[in-house]
Image: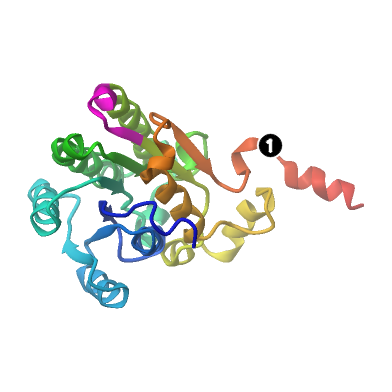
Amino acid sequence: MENRGLLAGKVAIITGAAGGIGAATAELMLARGASVVLADIAFDRAQQLAGRLGENCWPVELDLASEESIKAMVEKAVSHFGRLDILHNNAAALGPDIAEADGDVEHMQTRIWDMAFTVNCRGSMIATREALPHLVQSKGCVINTVSNLALQGHVIQAAYSASKAAIIQMTRSVAASHGRKGVRANAVAPGMTMTPALKEAFPPHIRKLVEDETLRDQLGEPEDIAEVAAFLASDAARNITGQVIVADGGLASHVPGIAGFMALGDN
């Protein structure tokens, strides 16, 4: 594997690491030489994953709604591994109950809006704030998982998309304020990605609507996003900062209704 040593000696915190994109990224970063803190509110699953992945990863319980929990995560990571090079803010509030309630603004429940911003945006800000002194020392980087919905309007998920759009601006702010201190900050914007949580939150007929508009012949997998995150974390991406890398299978790149036009060509 020619990329095996790209992250050698680096220490990464990945939030939401117990499954989906987080777990795939943890596995890839480990394969490329990093040590990884698996931070997740689902601590049992983080422990199980750590047991499978081996000694260079360490599970930490994390509640992104708790400032003290976030501070403790960073402190434990640095205490355990001695340094911090990569913060991957990946976790988000996106369970089936939340996805079902997160519709348009007219029908928005305040608790859903607050939850999206508390977990997704505020939690990522606190984690970044607490990590930055260590990232300055290591000349490290921040990677934020956002969404292509942060760049497009939709009739659903108004809270989720707005919180992710706020993280994009935070990404640019960190890149601007800390670039000369040696810290890079970038975001990766997946489209609909076939994680277990997404499959549970969105039934097949909803996924089909997105799949029809995707330029690939399938929706993305967690490993597709992990590859982008691991690249951004490496020195190979040293000249990339303040950017949003869209990894949505081309969904956001074309005119509306392309699936219908493609169907016309089949007639």
x, y percent for residue 253: 64, 36
Q: Residue at x 45, y 61 (%)?
A: 198
Q: Which residue is depicted at the point 31% across and 53% down? A: 91
Inspect the magenta stretch and tell me whether residue 190 lies in it. no
From which residue to which does the magenta span run? 177-185
Residue depicted at 41% across the width and 62% down the height: 24
Q: Where is residue 11 in the image (x, y as percent from the top left)?
A: 24, 53
Vertical placement of residue 17 versus 102, above or below = below
Residue 167 in the image: x percent, y percent? Answer: 33, 35
In this picture the colour scheme is rainbow
Q: Relative to 99, is 209 on the left or the right?
A: right
Q: Is residue 180 magenta?
A: yes
For the residue pair 104 and 2, the one nearer the viewer reads as 2
* Image position of 49 (left or right of 190): left
Residue 111 sits above or below residue 196 on the image: above
Residue at which label 1 appears = 256
